[in-house]
Amino acid sequence: MQRTWGFYGRAREIAMIEDILDRGRWFFCAISGRRRIGKTSLIREALEAKWDHDKVLYFQIPDSDERGVVQAFQDALESVGAPPDIAKELRTFAVMAAMIQVLCEDGWVVILDEFQYFHRKGLSSFQSLLQARVDQLRDTARGGLVVLGSIHTEMSAVLEDRNAPLFNRITDRIEVEHWDFETLFQMFEAHGIADPAQQLFLWSLFEGVPKFYRDAFDQRVLVPSTDYRSETLRRLFFEGSSPLRDEADNWFLREFRGRYDTVLRLLARLGPCSHGALTEEFSRAGTESEKQLGGYLKILVDNYRMVERQLPIFAVKKERKARYAITDNFLMSWLGGLARNVSAARIMPLARPLAAADEALATVEGFAFERMVHQLTIECSRADCGDFTLSEMVRGYWNSADTEIDLVAIDDISKTIRFGSCKRSAAKHDTADFDGHIERFLKTKDGRRFHGWAVQRVLYSPVFTEKERHDLSNKGYICRDLHDFRNYLFRQGTRP
């Protein structure tokens, strides 16, 4: 079992950055990804073996005004040994932009974190000042500028909008996604997490966000344990020094202006729901209109990517009927079960709110497991290491009260359609009910398209016993659990 925290995965991104560094000319690289996804660790790891450590300046832009940003940049300069007289010259954005140019010309890599803040009105003047310096640095042979951002749409507005000063200036763009499951299984194995139930529990909380797993490691709960649920929740969320106790409020909800947090809390309480149902609940919480709710939803879907607009199964993109759901595991777990109980623990004995949070998270886990299976199926197909080659993963929700199938996967080449049922407990699978949903779908207009195709009925759970697998296989069902998916991914020769 690994006793130290390592750097996991990101081989593709590391290779991209190393290629940029090896070109031998100045670069302007934008790296985007949600908060805590590991953007800073990624660039640090890539620079470790490729760049002079004494010529790297990291600067996190504060959510402040011009003077606050310039002061923070001055502090960053002094921390890497810049002479005080040079740092003291910094008073304006113009001087700050000039200093970035001087550093790059001297062979430095300058890293600006939270770059999306320059999209805000009070800081936007820096864009034009930096553009002038970037234009002078292009085609030079030394140094580089890396900008990191956590809000995709605001980063795009600063760097890709045709009317933005920095449009067409970046030389490279890297999007940092969640850890994939190949990396997750490698990390789990390194730390001895072999129980599929514990793997699901951790993924339903943290998805593929490296920082959260690092917090679990630091708090000594990223270990095999019989009481892993209560220990993980207690140490990470419920104690006074818990690292994630205020994470959502400090890093997510704090950025939401207006009543975005109200919309998120309603979605967490209601679960995936229609626009109409959400409008009705939203109107009870204040005086704002349906139009204003639509604006909030658009921002949460497009800018923050915290909410997904789901269409009915097989619906065209222009379909107006839709429902909305939170897609970020951590935020869903926080709003769906942790926030109110963490608050309650401040005034009552810990055991009761801790148990209530655990119970609420069990419901969240059910939705999370379905998403987990979808993503695992896609990743295995993409890597050509699973048992089903996808041409299409059907997305959306069932707009029918009598039909609900958790997974519909299509292989057009072999004319095979796979129907899947996802349950946290293998004993909960009701094969007769599952078959009924499939038969009803195949009789619909959309279902008749698959007449004559091979039909696979697949049951998914975190783990199946040998007896369960044997009995269900004899009835014509395929059983797949997390052990199977792990073995598929490690079959590629990536086992640590």
Image (cartoon, rainbow, N blue to C red):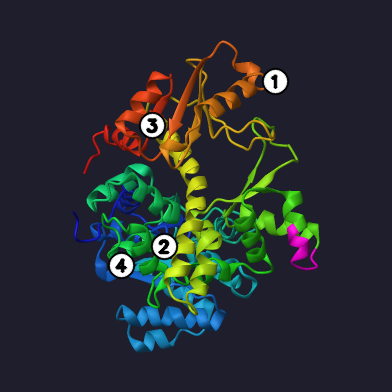
Residue 282 on the magenta span:
yes
Tell which of 438 and 454 is nearer to you. Answer: 438
| First reached walking from the N terminus: tag 3 or tag 2 | 2
The secondary structure type at the circle numbered 1 is loop
Work out whether mark 1 precedes mark 2 in sequence or the reverse, and give the earlier one.
Answer: 2
Q: How many marks?
A: 4
- Residue range of the region highlighted in magenta in the rendering: 281-288
How busy is the neighbourhood of tag 1: few (under 14 within 10 Å), some, or many (20 plus)? few
Q: Earlier in the sequence, mark 3 or mark 4?
A: 4
Badge nearest the viewer, 3 or 2: 3
| Residue assigned mark 3 | 480
Disc 1 versus disc 3: distance between alpha carbons?
29 Å
Residue named by callout 4? 219
- For label 2, the crowd category at 10 Å Cα-Cα, with few meaning under 14, some 14 to 19 and many 20 or more, is many
**Which amino acid, by three-letter code, is at mark 3?**
Arg
Q: Are marks 3 and 4 in contact (CB under 8 Å)?
A: no
Residue 253 picture location, percent across and down: 57, 67
Q: CA distance from mark 3 to mark 4?
A: 32 Å
